[in-house]
Image: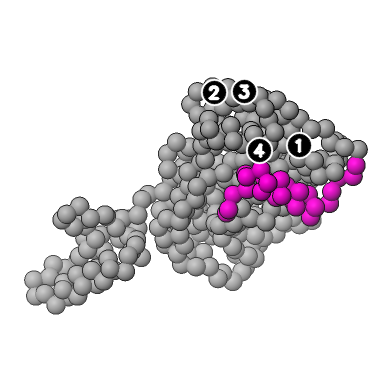
């Protein structure tokens, strides 16, 4: 991968193209009429005959997690005290939200034991009710069971995940690329566990979509399912920013922060001051783009550290998120 001085990323997609580029460079080196100052982009212009360009697409801004529900104003002094070991380049992924035809809705309703008539509501949206309900629209399938949960104990986390996975598999709704699943929430009254499945690749995925949630009741009863899945394909390989460059955004207060603070000490709307020492950095993926256009999953840096409030009243875990792609520097919430 080569980056031109205009900021474009040049992606080598085929070995034969790499050989062609090397041959061009060699020819220019040996030619007495070589023009000084030839840049990488000049060497990868689209050749005659309409061959595919080697310039990677400019990615939409990445959707970083927004955790600031209390509207804090962060004025933190941040330092990096870790050893970074991250790749220099990674692939991005293209994805397209799943849609459902009326025939597919009929098959799913039959598998779930819903016997009502399908109502087409336009724009790929369908609903059917009878011993439960099923609703689909582009990018979403929602099932609500008509079954009453028995008067039994709620299963433990491992059993809840197993119930959810087995139900999805038997219903024909378990994607091939789903991960092992995990319980993300436990509700005491009424007793419920919510199991989430995300893509096995790319991982970890910060975004809630693509994803599946299954609500489990007492006795392992499936009460509700929401499926926001997608067709995922690996795309081009992109150069990553250096960790030092990315941390400059954290130190300059341009990152997104995730920190949980006691509300009695830090009321809503407070200005949060103090120091943060970041010890670790890892890479996760987040989505970008809007539904209806080509959407992506792209890597982001995840800095983990410890926040010490001004005055030294305790310490708290904190995470900062920064875009990792050199062509996508403006985060959006």
- Magenta residues span 152-177
Whichever of labels 2 and 1 marks the residue nearer the N terminus, that label is: 2
SS label for mark 4: helix
- Residue placed farthest to the left in the image? 33
Name the front one of labels 2 and 1. Answer: 2
Q: How many marks?
A: 4
**Distance Cα–Cα, label 3 vs label 1:** 21 Å
Whichever of labels 3 and 4 marks the residue nearer the N terminus, that label is: 4
Q: Is residue 117 visible?
A: yes
**Distance Cα–Cα, label 3 vs label 4:** 14 Å
SS label for mark 1: strand
Image quarter hosting the N terminus = bottom left
The residue tagged 3 is 117
Specify few, some or many for label 2: CA neighbours under 10 Å numbering under 14, 14-19, or 20 or more.
some
Query: Where residue 9 sits: x, y (%)?
Result: 35, 58
Query: Where residue 316 sits: x, y (%)?
Result: 74, 55
SS label for mark 2: strand
The residue tagged 2 is 120
The residue positioned 51% from the left and 56% from the top of the image is 299
Q: Does the segment drawn in magenta span residue 165?
A: yes
Q: Does the segment drawn in magenta span residue 274?
A: no
The residue tagged 1 is 223
The residue tagged 4 is 111
């Amino acid at each position: 991968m080569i980056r031109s001085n205009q900021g474009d990323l040049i992606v080598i997609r085929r070995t034969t193209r790499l050989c062609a580029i090397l041959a061009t460079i060699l020819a220019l080196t040996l030619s007495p009429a070589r023009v000084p100052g030839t840049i990488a982009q000049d060497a990868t212009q689209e050749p005659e005959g309409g061959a595919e360009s080697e310039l990677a697409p400019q990615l939409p801004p990445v959707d970083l997690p927004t955790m600031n529900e209390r509207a804090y104003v962060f004025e933190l002094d941040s330092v990096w005290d870790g050893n970074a070991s991250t790749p220099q380049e990674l692939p991005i992924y293209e994805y397209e939200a799943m849609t459902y035809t009326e025939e597919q809705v009929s098959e799913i309703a039959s598998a779930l034991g819903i016997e009502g008539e399908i109502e087409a509501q336009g724009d790929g949206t369908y609903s059917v009710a009878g011993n439960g309900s099923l609703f689909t629209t582009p990018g979403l399938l929602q099932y609500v069971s008509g079954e009453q949960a028995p008067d039994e104990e709620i299963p433990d986390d491992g059993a809840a995940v197993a119930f959810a996975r087995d139900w999805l598999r038997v219903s024909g709704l378990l994607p091939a690329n789903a991960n092992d699943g995990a319980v993300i929430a436990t509700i005491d009254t009424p007793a419920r566990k919510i199991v989430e499945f995300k893509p096995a690749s790319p991982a970890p995925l910060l975004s809630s979509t693509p994803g599946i949630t299954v609500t489990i009741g007492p006795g392992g009863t499936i009460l509700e399912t929401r499926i926001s899945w997608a067709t995922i394909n690996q795309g081009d390989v992109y150069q990553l920013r250096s960790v030092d460059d990315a941390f400059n955004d954290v130190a300059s207060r341009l990152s997104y922060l995730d920190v949980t603070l006691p509300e009695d000490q830090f009321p809503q709307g407070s200005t949060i001051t103090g120091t943060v020492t970041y010890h670790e950095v890892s890479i996760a993926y987040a989505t970008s783009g809007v539904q209806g256009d080509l959407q992506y999953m792209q890597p982001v840096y995840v800095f983990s550290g410890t926040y010490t409030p001004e005055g030294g009243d305790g310490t708290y875990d904190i995470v900062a998120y920064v875009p990792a792609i050199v062509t996508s520097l403006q985060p959006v919430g």
